[in-house]
Image (cartoon, rainbow, N blue to C red):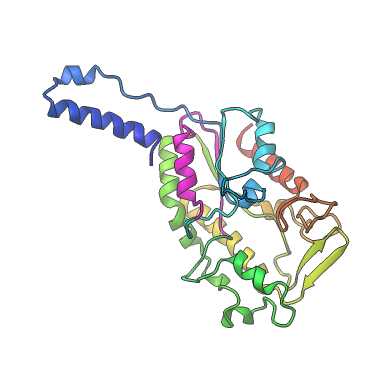
Amino acid sequence: MSGNGGRWLCAAAMAIAAALTGTTGAQADSTPAPAAPEGKALVVLGDSYSANAWASQDGGCVHGTTSWPVQLSALMGVAGSDQVADQSCTGASLDTGNSYTLAIEARDADKAGAFGPKTKLVTIQFGPNDTWGGASQNLWNASQQCLFDLADGCGPDAVAAGRMPDPQQVTGTQYATRIQKIVTYIRYYAPNAHIVLVGYPELFPAEQNSVCMDFFGMVPFTQPRGRTVVEYFNRIDQAQREAAAQLKLDYLDSRTLTAGHGACTAQPWINGVYDPTTKIDGLPFHPAPAGDAVVAKALYERYTR
């Protein structure tokens, strides 16, 4: 990883070169080592629930204007400044596939000098784009195939039939293992920062068997056999909690903060499809501005004031 680590490696390389060329210890010591970055106030590592924007056609990372990191940076008084490193990217994962991963985002943040003693808050939000337990599909890809399949759906039998990956494979131990090295690195170079695993908002109540999506704010579509999708989000929520406990990190329970405002509710904080009551051009099943505002406020009040 470059950035902070690269600076120390550079200093070490200079010392070795001096030794090989016969430079005296005093001469070698007189060469100043590169200054370590002071760090940025806010560092965001995450997927589309952090970025909250459609992926760009050229594969670059785009950030929605009402995403919780944007709203949080405004509350912190650092919006639009060099004190924010938002590396979140739609489609990103912990470590699955060839897309942006946690390690890549952390590397890019490090290159930008994001980690240092003045770093206040580092957030991590990943999970639905990953495969678990050797499955070949992640939650999103599998859900797109079964949500509109009224004949078979995404019920408990979908796992055995191969239509959905098994939610039981999503565990806190695996989650912790997949983020541990990055967390260790961040802790070393940003020793004063709060490192927070940010949970996902409530899309559907944890006990619900069906899943619903609003079209145009007036035409709800319900898949009555949706239990496996709901259970998958239940397991990601549990895995994040357990991983936070194992690694002694903070956990933001976004699900509780947004309870009662999921998809197809009377006051949804989750986008439908071209739904003017939430955000007409927003990502479906992703937070509406009101939902992101709640998460931003909670992070601000708990970790940056």
- The residue range painted magenta reads 99-127
Question: Compared with residue 55, is residue 18 higher up or lower down, i.e. above or below?
Answer: above
Q: Tell me: 121 left or right of 300.
A: left
The spot of residue 86 in percent (x, y) is 57, 39
The image quarter in which residue 85 lies: top right
What residue sits 81% from the left and 62% below the top? Answer: 214
Q: Tell me: 18 left or right of 50.
A: left
Q: Is residue 85 magenta?
A: no
The spot of residue 171 in percent (x, y) is 51, 65
Count the marks: how many?
A: 0
The spot of residue 304 in percent (x, y) is 61, 34
Quadrant where the N terminus sits is: top left
Relative to the observer, which residue lies in front, 59 or 292?
59
Question: Compared with residue 247, is residue 31 higher up or lower down, i.e. above or below?
Answer: above
**Res 63 visible:** yes
In the image as oriented, which residue stretches furthest toward the right? 218
What residue sits 13% from the left and 29% below the top? Answer: 20
**Res 301 visible:** no
The spot of residue 193 in percent (x, y) is 51, 36
Relative to the observer, which residue lies in front, 100 or 173?
100
Question: Compared with residue 297, is residue 168 higher up or lower down, i.e. above or below?
Answer: below
What residue sits 74% from the left and 51% below the top? Answer: 282
Q: Tell me: 164 left or right of 224.
A: left
In the image as oriented, which residue stretches furthest toward the left? 22
Quadrant where the C terminus sits is: top right
Q: Tell me: 205 left or right of 215.
A: left
What residue sits 50% from the left and 71% below the top? Answer: 135
The image quarter in which residue 44 lies: top right
Question: Compared with residue 14, is residue 30 higher up or lower down, i.e. above or below?
Answer: above
In the image as oriented, which residue stretches furthest toward the front? 58
Q: Is residue 105 magenta?
A: yes
